[in-house]
């Protein structure tokens, strides 16, 4: 695929790859339901088209961080169960309940708010309770868990809520053998036992703990449902252990806006961090830090242009950066691949992350709204 429209840049998203990645993850967790994590605009890939592909690949549920992300799924006509797990005071919970969105609570405050919204709408709020099993991020800490369970049991008896999920999240599942992993599993088991004692359990209550890294490395944490994010997009959850057969879905491409010869000794871009060593051809690539190409990529990241790898030279600017192709041919409009699955020798997203000292999640989610997402491999 190449540019069908004359846009400066585009992110090509291979929906067939996403479907296959989801199938592969389902094979890894047989017997568990799969909730695709599509928060943050499906990790920058585009919420609605990706969510449809994720469902086609076998996900029976979707998960978002914000309630408004869940509402956006409903507005697009997506009807599978959706869970939204970050609630702040005063969110549109009535709207969420009327849209059939399941909500998560980590403490009595949000749980009471959810119940109040349920009373106002006349809908029973399908609620997931989050236990903090050792990450110290979301979730009720162990000391507060019995109180949360007691409140949930009371609100459930009243008919305001129905507890449909008991869940937690790993801090270090991407670090195989990390000492916290077994401790978190033990804490989760203890949390489940307390829920049973509080009468907040049963076969209809979904137990869920595993993110992508746990799906591929910790089969005993699959429980009733798994919650992959990064792996669905074909990016390895444990890069040190390879790609697990996943295929990167996103290719980021741009077109050279200007190719020009410059003399030896030309200082390039803000601050003149790079100077040409000889007469040379520079290419202007119309993507910058406003599009998520970190300023920090200067002198670190590579792109594919004219069939070869090229370094980003000089400062990355807001809307553009430069490459130096020496005496190789380069024309206005030529395609530059920043990253892709690697088939044509282009850098992968993992290479970008490694070169920038970050993780692939950050590379794809920072891709700006100005870059159109273009879809290929759509299902029937
Ligand atoms: C983002 C997220 C996931 C998915 O995590 P990955 O590591 O991308 O697989 C799962 N569960 C929760 C609660 C999350 O916030």
Image: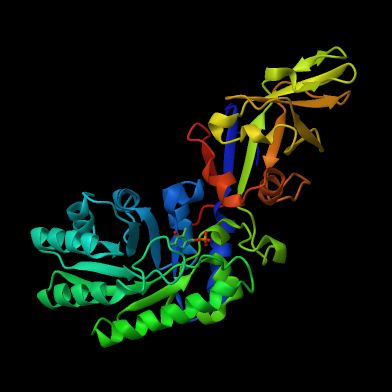
Out of 238 and 89, give the one closest to the viewer: 89
Query: Which of the 4 image quarters holds residue 12?
Result: top right
Out of 197 and 216, give the one closest to the viewer: 197
Coordinates of residue 160 in the picture (x, y in percent): 14, 69
**Quarter of the figure that contains the N terminus:** top right
Above or below, 308 relative to 174: above
Out of 22 and 160, give the one closest to the viewer: 160
Residue at the (54%, 30%) spot, across then down: 290
Residue at the (53%, 72%) spot, across then down: 26
Q: Is residue 206 left or right of residue 5?
A: left
Q: Is residue 115 left or right of residue 38?
A: left
Coordinates of residue 118 in the picture (x, y in percent): 14, 62
Q: Is residue 66 left or right of residue 369?
A: left
Q: Which colouring convention does the figure follow? A: rainbow
Residue at the (18%, 57%) spot, across then down: 98
Residue at the (22%, 60%) spot, across then down: 109
- The answer, for residue 269, to whether it is visible in the render is no
Query: Which of the 4 image quarters holds residue 276?
Result: top right
- The answer, for residue 59, to whether it is visible in the render is yes
Coordinates of residue 179 in the picture (x, y in percent): 59, 74
Above or below, 329 relative to 374: above
Coordinates of residue 185 in the picture (x, y in percent): 48, 78
Q: In the orientation shown, which residue stands out farthest toward the front? A: 143
């Amino acid at each position: 695929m190449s540019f069908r429209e004359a846009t400066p840049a585009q992110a090509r998203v291979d929906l067939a790859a996403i479907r296959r990645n989801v199938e592969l993850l389902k094979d890894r967790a047989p017997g568990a339901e799969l909730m695709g994590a599509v928060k943050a605009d499906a990790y920058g890939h585009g919420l609605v088209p990706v969510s449809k592909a994720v469902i086609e690949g076998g996900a029976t549920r979707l998960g978002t961080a914000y309630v408004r992300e869940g509402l956006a799924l409903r507005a697009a006509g997506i009807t599978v169960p959706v869970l939204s797990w970050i609630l702040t005071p005063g969110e549109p919970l009535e709207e969420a309940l009327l849209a059939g969105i399941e909500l998560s609570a980590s403490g009595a405050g949000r749980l009471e708010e959810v119940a109040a919204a349920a009373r106002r709408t006349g809908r029973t709020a399908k609620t997931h309770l989050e236990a903090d099993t050792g990450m110290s991020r979301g979730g009720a800490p162990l000391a507060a868990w019995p109180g949360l369970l007691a409140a949930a049991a009371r609100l459930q008896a009243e008919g305001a809520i129905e507890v449909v999920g008991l869940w937690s999240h790993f801090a270090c599942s991407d670090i195989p053998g990390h000492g916290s992993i077994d401790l978190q599993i033990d804490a989760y088991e203890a949390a489940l036992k307390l829920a049973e004692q509080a009468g907040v359990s049963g076969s209809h209550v979904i137990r869920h703990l595993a993110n992508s890294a746990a799906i591929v490395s910790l089969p005993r944490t699959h429980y009733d449902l798994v919650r992959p994010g990064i792996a669905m997009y074909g990016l390895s959850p444990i890069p040190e252990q390879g790609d697990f057969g996943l295929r990167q879905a996103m290719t980021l491409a741009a077109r050279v806006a200007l190719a020009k010869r410059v003399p030896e000794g030309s200082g390039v871009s803000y601050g003149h961090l790079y100077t040409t060593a000889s007469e040379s051809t520079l290419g202007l690539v119309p993507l910058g830090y406003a599009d998520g190409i970190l300023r920090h990529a200067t002198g670190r990241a590579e792109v594919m242009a004219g069939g070869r790898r090229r370094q980003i030279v000089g400062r990355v600017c807001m809307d553009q950066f430069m490459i130096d192709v020496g005496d190789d041919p380069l024309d206005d409009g030529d395609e530059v691949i920043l990253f892709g699955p690697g088939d044509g020798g282009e850098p992968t997203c993992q290479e970008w992350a490694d070169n920038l000292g970050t993780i692939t999640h950050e590379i794809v989610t920072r891709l700006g709204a100005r870059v159109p997402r273009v879809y290929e491999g759509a299902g029937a």
